[in-house]
Amino acid sequence: MNVKKPIGTILLLLALYPLGFGQVQIRNTTTDQQRRKDIEYIDRQPLQLTRVTPAGIKNVIVMIPDGCSTELLALGRWMNNGLPLALDSRISGLVRTYCSDSPIGDSAPTGSTYATGHRSQDGFIATYPARSMDSAGNRFDTDPDLAYQPMFTLLEAAQQQGKATGMVVTCYFTHATPADFLAHTPNRNQYNRIAKQMVHHPCDLLLGGGSYWIDSSKNAGYNAQKELKKRDIFYTKNFAEAKQSAEQGNYKIWGLFSSKEMDYEIDRDPQEQPSLEEMTRLALDALSKQENGFFLMIEGSKVDWGAHNNDLPGTVFDFLAFDRAVGAVMDFAQKDGQTLVVVMPDHQTGGLSIGNRRINSGYAQKSAQELFEPLKNCKASYEQTVKALFTEDTGKNLAERLQESIRNNFGIDSIAQDKIDALIPILQENKAARKSVRALSDVLNAHFYMGWTTFGHNGGDVFFAAYHPYGKELKGIIDNEEINPYICREAKYPSLDELTQTYYAPVGRVFPQASYRAVYKNNKPDEESDPLYLELRLKNKTLKIFPNTDRAELNQKEITLPGICIFNGKGAYLPAECAKLLK
């Protein structure tokens, strides 16, 4: 009897079983219901392409898990009880993440690349670089006529098309990635300048952190709440109010739910702050009701922040929170049929690995429970653990409080006394500052099985995931400069380079015949501060322009410019249409 055929068939079925062709799934039935921070296990099936008559892309959603390493995909699955991530079925390639002048990118220039289509320089926010490098890595100065010029972004292009626009983040809104899509400066740390630009040239919906820059705006010479209200934007610090406003049909909402950055997911009090998924769902509900479509950028901001401190629970739980937001977006896109979604980190941070020198040998004998259960049982980030040492007074000395926190939050009661003794002076000197968090992470990470190589960024490729209703996703090894043109092409956005020249022309090109001066307080020019105003004179006309706003005075009469005036410390840039004002 010939038995080759059935045996071959059986072998084929066995080979296909891990790919999902089998009906039986073996699952870990252990539940985490009694734990303070439950892990939400999600069993997701691969998305099926929506069969629709091609009508074009109406909505664009860009999702960026800042600083996310590819290793987090595998770690996230184990933390999700071995089940697939929402990302998994949509991953189609890898992205090279370098910036204009370095193989290892920073959030400002790498996020700018996605936003503008051009690589930029370390620290630059949607601004043309002053320095670049050739294919061999040799650095050179760029064209001085282009250096420091603001570059038009995807979000701004969507505004020009009359689309609703929004951003959802867990950092403060002036931070690098959200700023990349709406602000323009060669210094990412100029938060006051960035806030002023974003308030005077706002997206419709903004959810995240950073109320400090709204509430303190009067110190910077303007009233942010008044400016938002002038543009019919509802401002709140309360998520329930933001949600109620959206349910009433409003999509112009700025909800800022913390003074600066929001808490890590593992530390988040759901009564005080919404999750990234909750903010994402609110944004989708509000923006999707707009007739012309929308552009939305969503950032899992603090994946990067945790990785910078090698904060394992901070990083991992924020990544899982981001993946839940991805699930919400993919579900929406599949049902909508006119939404393009792209998901990719801007760079990697920390050099995370599953496995460290604690298991140089014997790694294959470690079970999943041994490797990952201690991390699942964590009750706080390392950062929050340090903060609590200086905000919660239990009457015990610092060493006792530290040991108690480590035991309660991480289940570790075997820290060597010499490690505790070395930590105490660092904590006493630096309190809750980053140096203290990193010192604690060095001690605690030795008790887990995950490794880190740096507190900084690393230059490896990152994953690319996408959903296109007609199956036209990018695939393979993708240069980070290719993603923006792909979005513009599929969504039929106009040329961003042409919009740059139209809306961000150098002031000398707009008014070549006029005399020009920047007037500073006490006549002290300062790259870090905006001048009081820019003054242009031509014959019998005087034009005063208030930098980083759309406000001006023509012969002492207040007017509104046809766009914002960008002043970035290196130059002033205006809509070319302003030339008509002095004619």
Image: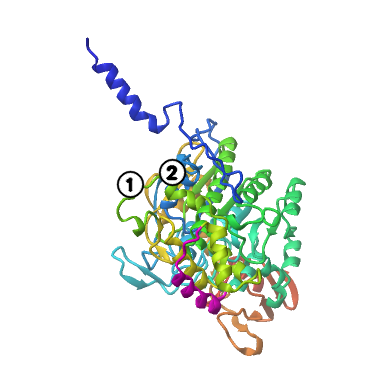
> Position of 104 compared to 234: left or right?
left
Residue at image x 54%, y 31%?
A: 53
Report the disc number at residue 91: 2
Residue position marked by numbered label 1 in the rendering = 364
Q: Which mark is residue 167?
A: none
Which amino acid type is shown beneath numbered disc 2? Ile
- In the image, residue 208 lies at what x, y percent? 64, 58
Image check: 484 left or right of 355?
right
Q: Residues within 10 Å of mark 1 (few under 14, many from 20)?
A: few
The quadrant holding residue 130 is bottom left
- Up-down: is 84 above or below 255? above
**Chain part drawn in magenta:** 412-432
Farthest residue in the top direction? 1
Quadrant of image for the C terminus = bottom right
- Point out the tag, 1 or 2, that comes first from the N-terminus: 2
Work out whether residue 569 or residue 98 is closer to the camera in this orientation and state it.
Answer: 98
Q: Is residue 337 magenta?
A: no
Q: Is residue 180 something that shows in the picture?
A: no
Position in image of residue 171 (x %, y %): 59, 62
Magenta stretch holds residue 420: yes
Secondary structure at numbered mark 2: strand
Left or right, 512 with respect to 23, comes to: right
